[in-house]
Image: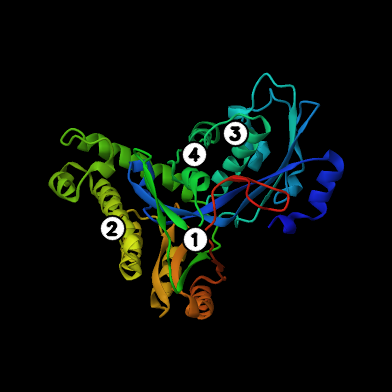
Amino acid sequence: MIKQLENEYIKIFQREYGRFLFFFAPGRVNLIGEHTDYNGGYVLPCSLHIGTYVVARLNDDGMIRLYSKNFHDDGIVSIRKDELAYDECHGWANYPKGIIQALMPKHVQKGIDVLYYGNIPNGAGLSSSASIELATAVMLNELFQLRMEMMELVKISQKVENEYIGVNCGIMDQFAVGMGKAGHALLLDCQTLKYQYLPLSLEDCSIVIANTNKKRGLADSAYNERRATCEQALAKLQRYVSIHSLSDLTIEQFNEYAHVLSPIEQKRVRHVVSENERTKQAASALQKGDLHTFGQLMRKSHESLRDDYEVTGKELDTLVEAAWKHKGTIGARMTGAGFGGCTVNIVKDDHIPSFIEEVGKMYEMEIGYAPSFYVAKIGDGAKQLTKEGESMR
């Protein structure tokens, strides 16, 4: 990938600034365990080979200059270290600004010149924001010799997204981006942050990500609404059951105390409780190499997200249902916040070309425009790269 970046932007950067360093943070896809992270449950994500590349160097004038090849029409965001407050006009640059405000030592006289390039599809729900955050955090950790552990960078990045950006997300995105491991999925308990790497042995199958190409305009407001409903339900249930989060609730306890919840709260909590159990079952199936069971659990996950959590929508449902009809599909479901974005599919390798063709045609006939497909490779988490693109981790 670094060789692909050796274009006019890199050459200009090198000519103007001299020596620089490379960094990378991946996107992520969640295999199962949706809307459970902020409810204290289990998730099962993996980091992708696509993500955010950063080229950076220290400067002597104390300025912070941020440039994105993806958003080059916005020009260079050039600011002083006392100008790091959130600014809506700065758009994408607020993500690195928040990390810089949190991590850049206040006493140093140096500034930084940074070039960003990302190959995560915009609006796909594959966590481009967390990718930018962790790429920036790893870069600052190296440039200023902060000697911080990855887990600390992950927590700081989530805090920036919550408090600086204003998105009340759980920790899954930053955790998967920072702690990912090539060839493995991550089983993460979002309440305790205990985690386990699970070898992702798909044998004659691959992960195929399908993008609805729908702009996710409703995602943020609906996300906040679902989270608020879950918090209200938790407060009601805590009068009867000793639990710290909804994911502590067993299915039996839910059935016993569901009557204290409103009909909408019942649906939301039923999803969280059942999805948490499905995720644990899916991890067990993955360890046994039982992809058939894993695929069945993916389908049940989507049905629950559609019927109980109500975050799918026509585009995601159409894309998933088309995948379910294809003979090469082992499992398919929406992934991410919902209301657009992507589906994650496990497809037999020899059926991938027909999967892309047939599922794409069915979707375009129903929706009116085509989806995009990506055969995913599972890569490492955020890291420094050499100029040649090799990991320095």
Find residue 375 and report its image quarter: bottom right
- In this rendering, which labeled residue sits more in front, label 3 or label 1? 3
Looking at the rendering, in which quadrant would you find the N terminus?
bottom right
Labels 2 & 1 near each other (Cβ < 8 A): no
Q: Which mark is residue 281?
A: 2
In percent of width and height, residue 3 lies at 74, 58
In terms of depth relative to the viewer, which is nearer, 107 or 309? 107
| Side (left or right) of 92 relative to 62 | left
First-in-chain label (3 vs 1)? 3
In terms of depth relative to the viewer, which is nearer, 32 or 71? 32
Measured in 3D between alpha carbons, the distance from the residue under mark 4 to the one under mark 3, in whole angstroms, is 14 Å
Amino acid type, label 2? Gln
Find residue 63 and report its image quarter: top right
Please, what secondary structure does the residue beneath circle 4 have? loop
Q: Which mark is residue 99?
A: 3
Q: Which mark is residue 342?
A: 1
Which residue position is annotated with label 4?
167
The residue at 43%/78% (across/down) is: 328
First-in-chain label (4 vs 1)? 4
Labels 4 & 1 near each other (Cβ < 8 A): no
First-in-chain label (3 vs 2)? 3
In terms of depth relative to the viewer, which is nearer, 30 or 78? 30
First-in-chain label (2 vs 4)? 4
Q: Is residue 317 above or below residue 149?
A: below
